[in-house]
Structure formats: C-alpha cells, structure tokens
Image: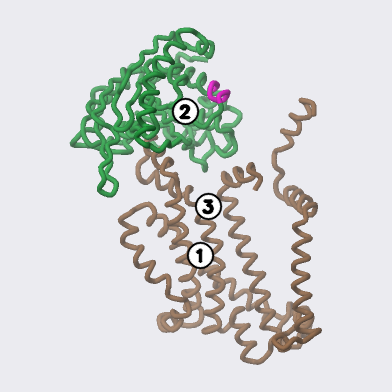
Amino acid sequence: MAQPGSASVNQGKGAISIRGVTKIYDPEGVNVMAVDNCSLDIPAGQVCMIVGPSGCGKTTLLNAIAGFHSITSGEILLDGEPLCNAEQPLARQSADRVVVFQNGALFPWKTLADNVAYGPIVQGRMSKTEAREKARENLAEAGLGDVADKYPGEVSSGMARRAEIVRALINDPKVLLLDEPYRAMDALTKSIMHEALLEMYDRTGVTIFFITHDLEEAIFLGDRVVVMTTRPARTKKIVDVALPRPRDYRILSSEQFRVLVNEAKDAVHEEALKAFEAGERELA
Amino acid sequence: MTEQAASTAVRRAAPPTGWAMFRYRAARAIRTTGPYLAILGIGGWLLVWWLFSEVWELPRFSKMPGPVAVLKDLFAFEPFQGISVFTAEYYEHIYVSCRRIFFAFLIATGIGVPLGLFMGWSRTFRDYTFPILETLRPIPILAWVPLAILMFKGFESPVIFLATLASLYVTTLNTLLGVQSIDEAYFRAAGCLGSNRWQIFWHVVVPGSLPFVFTGLQISIGVAWFSLVAAEMVSGDWGLGYLIVDAYMNNVTVPMVIGMITLGFVGWFTSALVRLAGRRLMQWRTAALALEGR
C-alpha cells in the first residue's frame, strides 16, 4: 500500500531532546513535583515508547512537548530549535507536533472526512476542496473510505482512533504524540490498531512519542522503551528493541520478544511497587 | 438470516425522509403504548375536571367553568361569552402574543447566545460581565414592569422588553454552561492542528456548546411565554395574557380558561419548533443518540 509520493516531507526531521526538564505543580500552595530533572534524546524517526506507573508524570512530559503545559526548568528542543525553556516555559502549539488523545478527540460535530481535512484548512495549506479530497484519499488508505461521511459517534472506537491518527498524519507532523490511545480497547482490536499504526509509521517515518502501560505493546511497536520512575518522573531504564521492521504479530511469540518484555518488566514492576507503597492512587 | 438477506437489511437501513419518515414514525408510534397512555392521561384529567366542576360541583370548583362549558363556547359560532375559534378576536389575541414572542425570542437569542459564547471563551470578558448578570437575574420580571412602562412608549415595546429580559438570562447562562462543558481535549486537539483563537471559536466553541444552547433555548421560550403573559396582564391591549385578565375584569370565566388552554398549546408548539431547529443543526448528535437507542 506504500506509495512513493506519500512519504512525509519531514522525513529525517523530528528529533526531540529533553534536557533536565523539571515540572512542579502548585495546586493550592502545595508543591508537587511531577517531573524531576528528566533527560531523554529521541532521534528523528524513532518510535519511543514511554512506560511507567500511573500518575508518574509521563503525560506531563507529553503536554510540555505539545505546548499544553509549561515546564518549570530545563529545556526541550525539536531538531535543535528550543520549544520551551526557562525563559519561555510554554511551547507554542503547532501542527509539527500532533497529539492523539487518551479518550479520543475527534470533533463529534464533524464527519470523519471533515475532521481529517480540518488541519490543512485552518493552517491555510490547502483549499477546502483540496483538503477534503486528500482527507478522503487518506481515510481510504487507512481502510476507512466507507465511513468517511459518518460522524465519530456513528463508528466504532477502533475506527475513530484510526481516523484520529489519519487526522494527525495529514499535516505531515515531525512528531506524533500518543497518550495511551489504545487503553480502553480489547486485545483483538488492539492488535489490529497496532498493525495499522506500524503500517502508517513505515510509510511516513514520523517520530513517535507513545505513552503506554502495556509492556507488550511497547516492545511490539517501539524502537526503544523508556521506563520512567514513579513520581517525580525520571528515566529509570532504557530498553533498546532491536527487532527487525516491518513487524507483524508473529513476532509476539518469538524468543527475542519474550526476553525483551521480561527485561522491561523487572524495571516496571519495581517502580509499580514503589508507587503502590507510596500510596499512589492508581488512576487506571 | 443468510448473508445476502443481512446485506439487504443493512442497505435498507438508510433512513427514509420527509413524508415517508413521518409515516414510518407514526406507524411505529401507534404500536407502542405511548400514544394510548397520553390519550388516557388527558381523558382522565378532563373527566376529573368535569366531575369536580360540573357534576358534583365541589365547593372550590363550583365557580370554575367546566370542560363542557368551555368546549361548547370554544367551538360555538356565536359564543355565549364572546370568544371562540370562529371569532376574529381569538386569532388576533394569538397573533399579537406570537408576534411579541417572536421578537422577544429573536432579540434574546441574538444577544444571549453571543454573550454566553464570549463569556465562556474569554475569562476576562466573563469577569467583566458575570457579576452584572448575576445581580440582574434574581430581580423578578414583574418588578421591572413600572420601569419598563416608563422607559418604553406604547403597549408593544415594554411587553417585548419584559419577555426578552427573562429569556435573555436563561439563554446566556445555558450558553456559558455549554462552552464550559466542552472537553478540554477538543481545544487542545484544535490547537495542535494549527488553529488560531478565532478558528477555535468557530470550530470548537460554537458547535461544542450547541447541545446546551438548544436546551437553554427551549427553556427560554417557555420563560418568554410566561413573562409575556404577566406583562400583557399589566400593560396590554391585545394578547392571550390580556384576554385572560380582561375576562376576569368582566367577570366572564370561560374566555379565561380558553385563553389558558390556548397558551398551553401555542407554547408547546413553539417549544417543538425550537427542538426541531436543534435537531436540524445537530445532526451529528441526533445520529449518535439514535445509535444508543434514544
């Protein structure tokens, strides 16, 4: 299905450097440190999976990159350009970093095609007709051609989530930020979603920053799995996933896959215990 | 079901439109208990009214005109107490009240919806306006009557002003609530897709608040009706409120009840119009609700 013409213009871009980022929330004068001096380098085009206990500050990091929340100190760079730092703690929101949200955020009042066409239209990159045409094309490529004129409330959650990724990728983002997008899905739907995401990744080569709880998902999708400590978040362990691409579900039963999962599991388990003992309320 | 039959069934699921849709809905409705229960309910209520006021003539009900007296006059060519569906006055009263409601509702919506949207969208604007709104809102409409008569000339404008005022609060507050009810994720999604502030206003704030706006408009048209009638009772020359109070002054009770029943039906009809407009504008929501079987 890969088309030579559909490769992203941003191929080879989208390197993220997180350098000593700290985030302190201050609700009602009680300081809560969500992220503590966290550093992480994500090369362009890498799929970086972030794993850690609930409420550990993973989403805070994603929000800082996307420009939803400010940081307290440190800096975040995109391709060497500062997104946010001590002087400008809140990154500017822009379509070079598009987020796919935990509970899905397709506009329920727009059809799938209009949702996908939205980005290029508001950015003024395409005319309305052009954008709608392109949106239909991309939806059809993702197997959603038949439901392009349906509203999000009329399609399954799996279809909606896939459409949301199509809506993100039509903007040729440098970075795709996903916040536990498949959390509420059953295992079967999940595996279909994984393959669809991998296929889109193989086509665009976009940098992916993916937050999850699910270790098998992390290893199956990622080039690298970053295990975060319990709050405040720091990087605890980095597992490099040297599985060949393109991947399909058969890899799940390979010995190599098992070894990697176990390696990551030990680190995650330790942090989960810590979080539990610290009386952290499980958000899940 | 065979696979082919199933696929035909799916194709047939395309919804009929217009008259066909109406017939389909009507046919489905008479197979449920709903319409029969409604008829029974209304019938029971009429029966109790008839027994209390015309058959047994209970102490508190003996001066009340009964349903037979009211219906007899309502459909009489020459009504005993002056008003029926065959007199021009009846329609003049309805027309005048409806015209006032139309303008009051139009003005209240035209000011209330944008006001509520901006209040929800901009914190600064809300900080300016919210205290004023909350101070003015508890003042009953009847308390405004003297001032309205002093401020506006004639019969028409003070009455419209009073009806507008009441529904303006409802519309504004519901719209504000509608904006505040929008999930933060939609604002963020719009932001990271490259929208500017105005695009977020048009593509997120306006459509996202519509469900609450239309709930507000339905309440607001009801509120407009009852403040209109109150206003017509105090200062009016025509209108259903005037009809009721005028009948009372002249000691004729049947036109009073005719006025009340007419108000009920006209009010119901206007609310239904608002609901219809809401469904038209929010097809995305209708579709989603229909799938949930609501």
Q: Which residues are magenta?
A: A187-192
Q: Could you tell me which chain the residue with mark 1 belongs to?
A: B
- Closest to the observer, B188 or B44: B44
Q: Main secondary structure of the magenta part?
A: helix
Residue extending furthest bottom?
B250
Say above or below: B83 vs A143.
below
Question: Chain coloured green: which letter?
Answer: A
Name the image quarter holding residue B38. Answer: bottom right
The amino acid marked with disc number 2 is Ile
- Could you tell which of marks 3 and 1 lies nearer the N-terminus? 1
State the separation of the CA atoms marked 1 and 2.
Answer: 42 Å
Give the labeled residue for mark 1: B106
Name the image quarter holding residue A10. Answer: top left
Mark 1 surroundings: few (<14), some (14-19) or many (≥20) residues within 10 A:
some
Mark 1: secondary structure: helix
x%, y% of residue B52? Answer: 76, 82
In the drawing, what numbered circle is on residue B211? 3
Q: Could you tell me which chain the residue with mark 2 belongs to?
A: A
